[in-house]
Amino acid sequence: MTGRSHTSRTSAEVRRRQVVECAVAEFAQHGFKGATTEAIARQVGVSQPYLFRLLPSKHAIFLETLTHAFELLKKAESNPGEGSASACLRLLRRDAGQLAKLLLQGCAAACDDEEVADLLRNRLGLLAAQLGFRDEELADELLRPVLGPRLLPAPRTASPPSSAVRCA
């Protein structure tokens, strides 16, 4: 027998999940353009080349991270014994609104990326329908953890003053 200790390697699937979980914080904080794969790799404890073996590009990591966020919300929504809307809203607000910030960063990235736009359009629409929210209500709930309730506009009840600027 040799004196070598047996260390088990982490499987690629486990590492991939770790990448996505760490990427949530990185993308939520810095957005798609500001986030770095170097920071994600460092948080996971892998090299950048290995990171790109797990997921081939920053864009792929971002899409996988957004998909992961929606899967978490779907899982919370289907949790028996708990109101689906309240479970999802708690999840969106947890960790200083990190998941809500990620989805908002996804919306910002969607302006330049049709693949991200399609993903968000489909999954946000499904989420709103599952929770029984109108699109505007879901948007308010995504903004609430980020802006706080005092910064959200009051519900519109009256028409704007005639001197208000109108966009065509």
Image: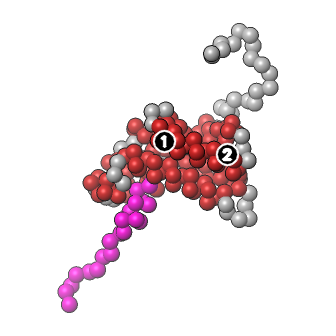
Q: Amino acid at mark 2?
A: Ala
Q: CA distance from mark 1 to mark 2?
A: 18 Å
Q: Amino acid at mark 1?
A: Val
Residue extending farthest to the bottom is: 1
Q: Is residue 158 left or right of residue 93?
A: right
Q: Is residue 17 magenta?
A: yes
Residue drawn at point x = 70 percent, y = 56 percent: 84
Residue extending farthest to the right is: 157
Of 94 and 12, the residue lying toward us? 12
Q: Is residue 157 above or below residue 95?
A: above
Q: Is residue 3 magenta?
A: yes
Q: Is residue 8 left or right of residue 150?
A: left
Give the mark count.
Answer: 2
Q: Which residue is mark 2?
A: 128
Residue drawn at point x = 80 percent, y = 21 percent: 158
Of 35 and 68, the residue lying toward us? 68
Observer able to see residue 24: no
On the image, the x and y values in percent for residue 9 come to 32, 71
Quadrant that contains the N terminus: bottom left
Residue drawn at point x = 47 percent, y = 37 percent: 114
Q: Is residue 146 above or below residue 38?
A: above
**Range of residues picked out in magenta:** 1-20
On the image, the x and y values in percent for residue 41 come to 34, 53
Q: Is residue 49 left or right of residue 141?
A: left
Q: Which residue is mark 1?
A: 116
State which quadrant residue 20 falls in. Answer: bottom left
On the image, the x and y values in percent for residue 144 come to 64, 40
Quadrant that contains the C terminus: top right
* SS under mark 2: helix
